[in-house]
Image (cartoon, rainbow, N blue to C red):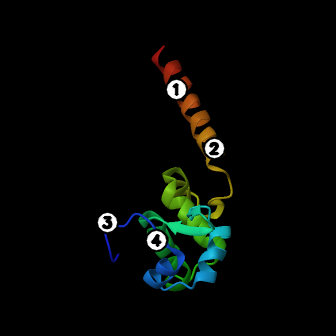
Amino acid sequence: MENKEKRYYRIGEVSRLTGVDQHVLRYWEGEFREIRPRRVAKQRLYRAEDIKIIERIKDLLYKDGFTIAGAKKRLMEDRNPVVSVQAELFPDTCCKAEPEAILEDIRRGLVSIKKMLEGAER
């Protein structure tokens, strides 16, 4: 970043810093819920965190060859360790279930293990 003290960057500055055209940034805002610039007087104001996410998306799409859907999935895995573990353990079913459903399956499994252990103690 140019100025570490700066809190907000306009879309032109973000475009210059990341090498992503302004129209692409506006499109990505609609595709990736992680990008949410503040809007003040019809101006998009991005934070440093937004710029990091934009750079991550750019790498996923342009460098790693992900599709937009694949990049969304990868960002979700980065954000949610449960989904990431599921991707490693069950690659064929990766990310088909919502994180809440995955957590519920894990909870049910733990409850059943607890019942088995309680029965073994008797």
Is residue 36 visible to us here? no
Question: In front here: 81 or 111?
Answer: 81
**Looking at the image, which is closer to me, 112 or 40?**
40
Which numbered disc, 3 or 1, marks the residue closer to the eye? 3
Q: Residues within 10 Å of mark 3 (few under 14, many from 20)?
A: few
* Above or below for 1 versus 102: below
Crowdedness near tag 2: few (<14), some (14–19) or many (≥20) residues, C-alpha within 10 Å: few
Residue sitting at 68 percent across and 68 percent down?
A: 30
Q: CA distance from mark 3 to mark 2?
A: 38 Å
Relative to 115, does residue 68 appear above or below in the rendering? Answer: below
Q: Earlier in the sequence, mark 3 or mark 1?
A: 3
Q: Residue at x 56, y 80 (%)?
A: 61
Secondary structure category for the residue under label 3 = loop
Give the image location of residue 36, x and y in percent.
58, 62
Marks 3/1: CA–CA distance = 52 Å
**Crowding near pointer 1: few (<14 within 10 Å), some, many (20+)?**
few
On the image, numbered disc 3 is attached to which residue? 5
> Which label sits in the foreground, 3 or 2?
3
Residue that mark 2 sits on: 100
